[in-house]
Image (cartoon, rainbow, N blue to C red):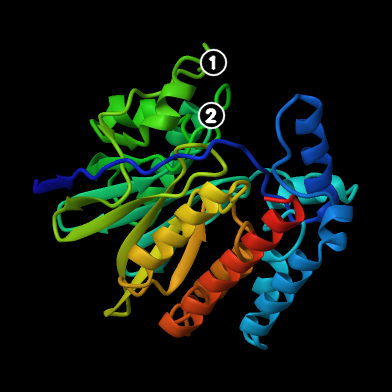
Amino acid sequence: MKIRTTRCALSAAASGVAVIVCLMAAGQADAQGRRGQGGPPTVPTEEQWLASAEAQRRAAAAMTLAGSDLLPQAQRFCTATGPLRLALARQAAGLAPIENYTIEPTRVFDNMYFIGMSSQNTWAITTSDGIILLDTLNSTEEARDVIVPSLRKVGLDPAEIKYIIVGHGHPGQSDHTGGALYLQQTYGAKVVMHPLDTEQILPAQRPDRPLATPDLDAADGQKLTLGDTTVTLVHIPGHTPGSLGVIVPVTHRGTPHTVMTFAATQMPTRASLLQFEHVFNEFARPLKVEAAVNFHAGGLQDDFVHLETIRNNPTGPNPYLYGPERFDRWMSIVIECGRARLAAMGR
């Protein structure tokens, strides 16, 4: 097994936690709740958003960047709360929760598979020397009963998992980290995580859901190679201090492309926004990223529709792929909408 890592200096972290919900009301309720806990607001109120001339100017600039082909994406990002997780959006709208169910594992790219549930998911990257798994669902049970059989269903051997990259973790919660210990102990997979999150979640782990101790610390710009595939880890703090993105070389029907996974896209401070700009300018643009995916289906786009489209027409166009020029505009929209929210909060 060929393993190579390059350690880079840790970037300045910005603490702060925000939500990913799809409706304005959900974000406002969460922001007010955090004020009640004594923490600073992570998103502006609706009143602040509408009253800020600077926020509205930047939101309008994002819509101009969007043109007609990225308008739904701009509308998703340029709100007081930003892009949003489906479960909380339904809750805010007074709708019944969607039953958490296992989604049909789907080969999205030649070497990258969607594995998981309607609540959260993982991505499996296949290489010439094994599998890199991104995130691990919520618990030992979900790793054992969802990840393992889903991998087998698409013809992959879970014993080939060599690395697990955990995108982020929350103290006292395990929705992305909970299955790591089982996979680490059962298959010998090495766990990679940013130390700023590790130092928060391990002391706060729940007794009924023990967490894996990472084997490797992640850092901004770190390269991790397994066989014929090298991924780039990038530090995108804001949702948690140690939130990570992973830039992945993929192929689609033999043609090379590049995908970036996002643990989250919150930028509640100027420092976190500047770090996103750094990642986009220093990594995503030079590597010609063309697609964005995350770990809560529906967080960045309508994954349920995209996955069904791929399953129903595997030889058709890939709905995740934007192309370099279109994705470049998408990144500019993300930053402009982040600036708008900071302006509305006077930051």
**Residue found at the far left of this picture:** 2
In this picture, residue 28 sits left or right of residue 151: right
Q: Amino acid at mark 2?
A: Ser
Looking at the picture, does residue 292 appear above or below residue 17? below
Q: Which mark is residue 88?
A: none
Q: CA distance from mark 1 to mark 2?
A: 8 Å
Residue at x 29% of width, y 55% of height: 232
Q: Earlier in the sequence, mark 1 or mark 2?
A: 2
Which of 21/179 is in front?
Answer: 21
Q: Is residue 130 left or right of residue 327?
A: left
Q: Position of residue 309 (x, y in %)?
A: 56, 75
> Residue drawn at (50%, 38%), measured in percent from left and top?
137
Q: Quadrant of residue 182?
A: top left
Contact between marks 1 and 2 (CB within 8 A): the answer is: yes
Crowd rating for badge 1 (residues with CA inside 10 Å; few <14, some 14–19, many 20+) = some
Q: Secondary structure at mark 2?
A: loop
Residue type, label 1: Arg
Which numbered marker is on residue 174?
A: 2
**Residue 243 visible here:** yes
**Residue 313 visible to the viewer:** no
Location of residue 334 with respect to 70 vertically, above or below: above
**Neighbourhood count class around disc 2 (C-alpha, 10 Å): few under 14, some 14–19, many 20 upward:** many
Q: How many marks?
A: 2
For label 1, the SS is loop
x 65%, y 72%: residue: 73
**Residue in the foreground of this view, choosing between 289 and 313:** 289
Left or right side of 151 for 6? left
Judging by the rendered image, the residue that carries numbered circle 1 is: 206
Q: Position of residue 142 (x, y in %)?
A: 50, 34
**Given the current orientation, which residue lies at the most extreme top position?**
207
